[in-house]
Amino acid sequence: MVPVGLVLGSWWDVILRKGTNTGSNTGIGKATALDLARRGARVILACRTKEKAEAAVYDIRRESGNSEVLYMHLDLASLKSVRNFAETFLKSEPKLDLLINNAGLITCGKTEEGFGMAFGVNHLGHFLLTLLLLDRLKEAEHSRIVNVSALLHRLGSVDFNLLHAQKDLVTGQSSWHAFRAYCHSKLCNVLFTRELATCLEGTNVTCYCLHPGVIATEIGRYMGLWQRLLAFPMSKLFFLDTEAGAQTTLYCALQEGLEPFSGRYFSSCGLQNVSALGRDDALARKLWEVSERLCGLS
C-alpha cells in the first residue's frame, strides 16, 4: 500500500509516489521516512530546522537509493508557517496519498501565536495542516492520515475554560506542567482522529492514531539537564529503538484492510482501546470546533 502521494498500480502495491511526514529529521519520523523511501516512495520531510532536515534527506537518499526524498520547511509552532507550507506544497506537489503527523515534543514555552507549545505543536499545528491538505488527499484514489499519539493520552484531559483564558491546557511552565501538557496534547490527537474519521465518512480518505511504543528518541531534548541524565540510562535499557518504534506507524500507513477501523487507535501493530475521554464523541466534536476557531477557520 501507500501513504501520502500518488499510488502507482493498485492500492496495495508498495510503491508510494508521495508521502508527507512532519517531525521527520530525527527519531521515528526519520525511520518511517527511510522505510517509505526504501519502498520507492516520493517522500517530503516537513521539518523546522533546515540543517538537520537536509542531513536527514542526505542520509535517507544514501541508505535507500531513492533520490525522491525532499525537504520542505514547516514550523508547527507557527500557524503562519503551516499555511505557507500548505500553499507551497499544493502548488508544487500534485498528488498526496499519505500524511503522517509525527511531530511531538515535551517542553514549556509558547508558540508564535501564544498557544502553549505542546498544545500548539502536537495538536493545533497538525490539525490546521491536515485540514489545509484534505482536498488534495481526497483527490487520490485512496489515502490515509496517520496521527502519532501516545499511551500517555490516558493521563490527558481538555479544559476548554483554561484554553480560552490562557491559550493552553496547563497553568504553569514547570517541567511537571510540560509533562501534563504533553499528555493533554496526546489526548487531543486521539480526539482529533476520532472526529476526523466521522467527517471523512463516505470519502476515499481514512485516518488512524497510534502509540508507537516507548522510544529512545529526542522527544525530551528540551528537558532540563538532570531530567535528561536520569532518562538516558533508562532509555538505553528499556526503550525501543527508532526502527522498532516506527513499525506501528508503518502498519497504520500500509496495512491492507484497515479502512473499517478509520478513527481507531493502534499499538504494537494491533487495534487497542483508548481512554474513556478518548471515546467521548461530544468532547471530540467540541475540540474540533474550538480548534477551527483558534486556527481562524471558522
Image: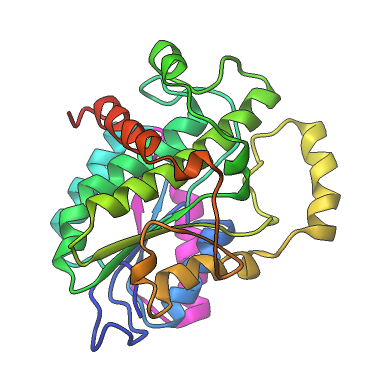
Quarter of the figure with the N terminus: bottom left
Quarter of the figure that contains the C terminus? top left
**Image side of residue 94 versus residue 246, left or right:** left
Magenta-colored stretch includes residue 286: no
Q: Is residue 72 magenta?
A: yes
Looking at the rendered structure, the number of numbered marks drawn on it comes to 0
Q: Is residue 262 above or below residue 84?
A: below
In x, y percent, where is residue 201? 22, 58
Task: From the top left corner, tell me how far across and down residue 8 is, in percent.
Answer: 24, 84
Identify the residue shown where x is 32% and y is 77%: 16
Q: In the image, 277: left or right of 259?
A: right
Residue 165 visible at all: yes
Write down the quadrant of residue 90 in the picture: bottom left
Q: Quadrant of residue 156?
A: top right
As rendered, which of 273 and 298 lies closer to the eye?
273
Range shown magenta:
50-77
Relative to residue 22, is residue 4 depicted above or below?
A: below
For the point 21% across and 53% down, the residue is: 134
Vertical arrangement, residue 258 with respect to residue 283, above or below: below
The front one of 264 and 82 is 264
In the depicted view, which residue is nearer to us: 220 or 140?
Answer: 140
Residue 23, position in %: x, y?
47, 51
Q: Position of residue 253 (x, y in %)?
A: 41, 69
Position above or below: 164 against 14 = above
Q: At 17% across and 59% down in the image, what residue appears?
A: 136
Is 284 positioned to the left or the right of 171 in the image?
A: left
Tell me the residue at 42%/82% (across/down). Answer: 39
